[in-house]
Image (tube, grey):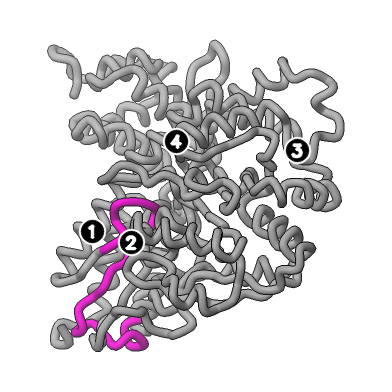
Amino acid sequence: MKPSGTTSPSAPQGDDAPPSWNAAWELLLPAAAAPARQRGRMLQSAFREAVRSGRLAAGTRLPSSRELAADLGVSRGLVTEAYEQLTAEGYLRSDRGAGTWVGGAARAADAPRARDLAPREAGALVDFLPGTPDLSLFPRAAWAAAHKGVLERLPHRSLGYPDPRGLPELRTALAALLARRRGVVADPERIVVCSGVAQATTLLGFALGERGERTVGVEDPGSPEHTALFAATGVRTRLLPLDEEGLATGPLYASGVRVAVTTPAHQFPSGIAYSARRRAELLDWARAVDGLVVEDDYDGDFRYDRAPVGALQGLDPEHVAYTGSVSKSLAPGLRLGWLLAPERLTGPIVTRKRTMDLGNPALDQALLADFVTSGAYDRQLRRCQRSYRERRDALVGALREHFPGTEVSGIAAGLHIIARLPARYGPEPRLLERAAHARVAVRPLSYYSSRGTERGAGASDGVALVMGYAHLPPSDIARGVRLLAGAVPAHDA
């Protein structure tokens, strides 16, 4: 909204404000009038569109954040955040003391429209495959500021070969974070900083193999990565079925394995949270066989409609190995994670970590330690939580509109849902073929199961889809569901 009594924004005029700024002004008005929680996202989207379309030409000088905030009637912080984000993305450039300008990285209207995240399946218009966060939410400005501060403070000795467990300050920060947020019993001396959960899994595989373990149990349905990672260490996997409460304990006892890999807080891919009874039964099994539960807490920080489920490790630290990372909260490309194992495994794990890579880069570890202790990591989690809740709601709403009768589960947590479409949209092969023809990337729950179909799905010919939403803006979510619905002719429904 423009200030009362004015007919144009109070942006610099004349040579300081080329006509294209005034031409782009109208594109920002809907964002300023949007509901408060959507305003920042819409303002950034409006700026991107103005640059892509050529309404804001390269070299255009923008008003100061204070001036634009006053003209739009929004907070200055909202405009500052938009400027910082778009500068990080290359749409804008900022010269200290010289203001903010439109950069030259974005193409004009005749170029293909840029996307925040390229599809992970070639040719897909909309990609609902699970497992990826929104990489545009990475806090570039805050990370850059922390980087500068850490470099100035980091002692010279910290740039030498690191402790293979990780920098002491990061292990201390992680111990406090995990105890506070996930209920983990965390001794900094037993935390090993890893290159994500993938390396944590291989470290465990080597350590378990040295102790004579040749087979570990994994969830079915479950993540295919677990089998591949253990195989790389010479350890086989045995698929163990789930029921509605989690890993079924009857088949677990019968399997003869002494190690089981689980995702109890938000099972991948089914989306269930292990019941309190099943969590207790799982620990009883580990004690009875002198075994180990491996807890992959891959998205444990994201809870929307209920209180967080504490980590299983907190109930029995000597029978649970706990793994996690910043891949969903910050970015998988950082390759930063952690492993907290029982005392009997810590020594072999640290030895293996030393021989694998001599430890993670010291500067990256110092950066994450600063990010955690300063409170910036908690702010990032809150920011992601708000955004992902909005996207989850957009997906659930779109499914209800375009696929009436769909049962949606696993929505209280995580970055994906399970959508069970009514039988009239099946059978599965036909729907998947038509989705591919519509260039919508989707993956059925059966993809993650050795049995090919989901336990408990009944005799229905419907399809259970695992749909990731975190990496998609609400507009793409709505578009993708519309395209998917259009792939099923009306007379079939």
Visible in this render: residue 265?
yes
Label annotation for residue 396: 1
Q: Earlier in the sequence, mark 3 or mark 4?
A: 4
Asked whether 236 or 59 is in front, the reply is: 236
Label annotation for residue 151: none
Q: CA distance from mark 2 to mark 3?
A: 35 Å
Q: CA distance from mark 3 to mark 1?
A: 41 Å
The residue beneath circle 3 is: 361
The residue beneath circle 2 is: 417
Is the Cβ of the residue at disc 2 closer than 8 Å to that at disc 1? yes
Q: Is residue 205 above or below residue 304?
A: below
Is the Cβ of the residue at disc 3 closer than 8 Å to that at disc 4? no
Is the Cβ of the residue at disc 1 closer than 8 Å to that at disc 4? no
Q: Is residue 37 toward the left or the right of residue 177 in the image? A: left
Is the Cβ of the residue at disc 3 closer than 8 Å to that at disc 1? no
Q: Earlier in the sequence, mark 2 or mark 1?
A: 1
**Residue 415 within the segment the image draws in magenta:** yes
* x 44%, y 75%: residue: 250
Asked whether 294 or 15 is in front, the reply is: 294
Q: Nearer the viewer, mark 3 or mark 4?
A: 4
Tag 3, which secondary structure? loop
Q: Earlier in the sequence, mark 2 or mark 3?
A: 3
